[in-house]
Amino acid sequence: MQSPFSEYTDTELYALLRTERRDVAFAELYSRLSQNVFAYTMRVLGDRDRAYDVFQETFLRLYQSADRISYLENVRAYTLTICRNLCLNEKKRAQTQMVEFDDTLYNPGVSRESDRQEMLKLIHMAMELLPHDMKEAFVLREYDGLTYHEISSLLNIKLDTAKVRVFRARQRIKEILEPYLNEFTKEND
Amino acid sequence: MPHTYNERIHKLLDGELDYPSESVLFSELAQNSELRSEFMQLLAIRTAVQQDRAALIPPVALTGSVFAGLGIASPLAGAAAGAAAGAAGGAMASTWLSKIIVPAIAAIAAAGITYGITASSEQWAASSEQRAASSEQRVASSEQRTASSEQRVASSEQRAASSEQRVASRESEIRRLRSEVAMLQLELLNALDRVEVAPVENSTLSEENVETETRATPIDLSHTITLAREADARVIMPMSQTPITPEYRDYPAFLVQFRGLASSGLTTVNVAPQKSLLENANLALMYQLSPRHLIGFEVGSESFPMSFEGTRNGQQIRYEQQPVSTWAGVAYRHSFGPIGNSAFTPFAQGLIGGSQFGPLGRITGGLQYSPLGPLTFMLGVEGTSMAYTHQDRWFTSSKIGLTYGLAIRF
């Protein structure tokens, strides 16, 4: 069974936030955007509690923004912009580098195969070692599936800069994980 | 046009490599083991990240917090079911489920309760009047019975008095007759004194020949007196009446019960339970069929620890969640009668119903305490098991804990 709003675009759903059907429209928008926002907050902030706070605040602001904004072309980009700004504020506030992160309790969906778990942990650690701008571009590209155009628009950078950041992020992660990846690829050959 | 093979690999991963460049890259990959190794490494990272991304689903509790923070109806259980179904977009179906069916159940329950309470304002009043009238009738009836008993007592007393009068009368007659007998005896003695002795001829007295003529007035002693005393004393027994025992005093009756739960899941999960306003609380409306048997309808809301597995994109995935679900069902309660003369009554209850996720069964055992009036307190232990499906596989969520509550009869 599908929602009667499943055929609506994000823009139409956002417009419905100004009507009496706001609750259902918001639920549909939430179902479409929550995974993107969650992945961004978890992987960019690297801290569960702060990620949860930012996640909640993002949707609160999105919902409230409908009172001020009547038309929004790209709701996903706007939502991620809110999320990004909140993450930046959070990082400034905390001013700590979160290297250690164990989300196995809150990320139970991953297969329990030990090598994959280990691989994920290493990737998380490698991501934490990336400069923030690289990590952000990488998360938006790899986790949120944004195009380079969307990333450049969201981060307010040039298209090539967005591509370079993602490229460098991948390369850095690969370099950090190279010893492990060599073994991993050999085992899987 | 990419300048290096490395850049071409990245373009390929991004899906932006054109066909001619792709052919060139594949040719190079076939020959260059170092490049192939780099490609494999980047591919491994991409695969791991995709797996990580697929598993990054907002927990149900977090979703609940978002909607609770906005003060709007939460699609939590629906979202959870949607997540369980493996598609965030599919959450809307469950959202509607939670938005329509749950409120409908709640509305029906609330309507029933409201009706039970408001309508019972009239019914309550009427019932109270009826009860008052009934009580008055019972009082009047008791008074009548008491009056009747008193009448019978009075009648018995009258009969006793009458008997005593009769006895007194007979005794008086006896005394009179005795005095008559005494008088007759006295006359007899006098008559004997007046006996005439005939002269003795031949101056010889022979005792043997002496004939004495006695003339006496015949006394009629044919009077016989029969005392008609009661053979045994009459025992005036109070009229036998069936006592109104406490269990019948309250029968039949409706009962509204509100109770809370303090339970812990037998299914282990690592996520915090979702919070909601009426979590772990339930409401029941029950009807007393007889002093020992009650049936009713119970509705409640509580979190269920759920741990289940499924596949998504060919990967085995384990899900954990603790959503709050509304449940409802029909209940049967058996009361074992009061312990001695105390106000404590042990009971056992079974419930069969369903939640938003699947069928549900519940067993409760405990004590009821009815110290005064229509109030009853209860405390017991409870076991609950709920079944649910995911990808055509059945899973169960079980809980055990304490329950405590308050019930009002009307």
Image (spheres, coloured by chain):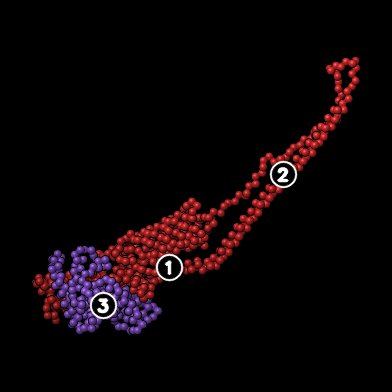
Chain colours: A purple, B red
Q: Are marks 2 and 3 in contact (CB under 8 Å)?
A: no
Residue beneath the point at 37% across and 59% down:
B401
Disc 1 from disc 2: Cα separation: 76 Å
* Secondary element type, mark 1: helix
Q: Amino acid at mark 1?
A: Ile
Q: Residues within 10 Å of mark 2 (few under 14, many from 20)?
A: some
Residue beneath the point at 40% across and 57% down:
B381
Q: Going from the N terminus, do you reach mark 1 or mark 2 first?
A: 1
- Tell me the chain of label 3: A
Residue B163's label in the rendered image is 2
- Tell me the chain of label 1: B
Q: Amino acid at mark 3?
A: Arg
Q: Amino acid at mark 2?
A: Ser
Q: Residues within 10 Å of mark 1 (few under 14, many from 20)?
A: some
Asked where in the image residue B163 lies, by quadrant, the reply is top right
Q: Is residue B360 visible?
A: yes
* Secondary element type, mark 2: helix
Asked where in the image residue A95 lies, by quadrant, the reply is bottom left
Check disc 3 and report the residue beneath it. Answer: A93
Point out residue B30 in the picture as x, y percentages from the top left corner. Answer: 10, 71
Q: Are marks 1 and 3 in contact (CB under 8 Å)?
A: no
Residue beneath the point at 18% across and 73% down:
A129
Disc 2 from disc 3: Cα separation: 110 Å
Check disc 1 and report the residue beneath it. Answer: B105
Disc 1 from disc 3: Cα separation: 46 Å
Residue B336's label in the rendered image is none
Q: Is residue B91 visible?
A: no
- Reply above or below: A157 against B387: below
Q: Nearer the viewer, residue B409 or B96?
A: B409
- Reply above or below: A149 against B113: below
